Amino acid sequence: MTWIAALPLTNESNCNLIIGEGTIIGHLNHIYATGEIIIGKNVLTADKVYISDNLHKYEDVNIPVMHQGIRQLSKVKIGDGSWIGENVCVMGASIGRNCIIGANSVVTKDIPDYCVAVGSPARIIKKYNITLQKWEKV
Ligand SMILES: CC(C)(COP(=O)(O)OP(=O)(O)OC[C@H]1O[C@@H](n2cnc3c(N)ncnc32)[C@H](O)[C@@H]1OP(=O)(O)O)[C@@H](O)C(=O)NCCC(=O)NCCS
């Protein structure tokens, strides 16, 4: 079971959630677009992955967080061929093509093409060297 939603809760004029051909979404994923989330082609998400372009507002401590409305974050794009590991959260950040995001990582900043990133916050640990055609540690 997975929760997939595209609802314009932040009053964006367009609200899109696009999932490309050949992409496999794991169990218990939670993917919620209020602006735009684009998941490319042939992306693999493991189980319990959270992908979102928004947050609950929390500015007013006198109001329960769930009643404070929603703040829009940056658009999210996950490039073709990427692999998103178990328990990963992607929040208002994009991931390039053929990237690997290690288990339990929290992605809050953009990750360029052909990178392995791990941790919370996710940091790049390997990059593919196109000239030498091999992965190199960063
Ligand atoms: C990211 C991943 C692919 C890296 O595999 P790898 O290229 O063989 O990487 P390495 O084992 O060489 O690890 C490199 C370093 O990153 C660390 N590392 C690897 N994965 C990590 C993770 N998820 N979180 C934090 N650190 C991690 C390693 O401990 C190692 O650290 P060191 O250099 O200090 O020893 C793998 O560790 C991973 O997390 N896979 C996801 C598995 C998954 O979710 N499967 C679901 C089924 S679809």
Image: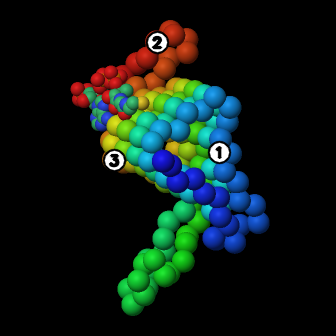
In the image, residue 93 sits, relative to residue 11, either above or below, namely above
Instruction: Name the residue at 42% across, 78% down.
Output: 65
In the image, 135 versus 81, the foreground residue is 81
Report, in whole angstroms, how far the alpha carbon at label 2 lies from the one at label 1: 28 Å
SS type, badge 2: strand
Report, in whole angstroms, how far the alpha carbon at label 3 lies from the one at label 2: 26 Å
SS type, badge 3: loop
Q: How is the image coloured?
A: rainbow
Residue type marked 1 = Ile
Report, in whole angstroms, how far the alpha carbon at label 1 lies from the one at label 3: 22 Å
**Residue carrying label 2:** 134
Whether residue 124 is visible, yes or no, is no
Residue type marked 2 = Lys
Q: At which x and y percent is residue 98?
A: 54, 26
**Residue 96 placement, left or right of 66:** right
Whether disc 3's CB lies below 8 Å from ligand 1 is answered: no
The quarter of the image holding the C terminus is top left
Q: At which x and y percent is residue 64?
A: 41, 83
SS type, badge 1: strand
Q: Residue furthest bottom?
A: 62
Instruction: Name the residue at 37% across, 44% down.
Output: 87
> Tag 1 or tag 2, which sits nearer the N-term?
1
**Residue carrying label 3:** 120
Residue type marked 3 = Ser
Q: Which mark is residue 38?
A: 1
> Tag 2 or tag 3, which sits nearer the N-term?
3
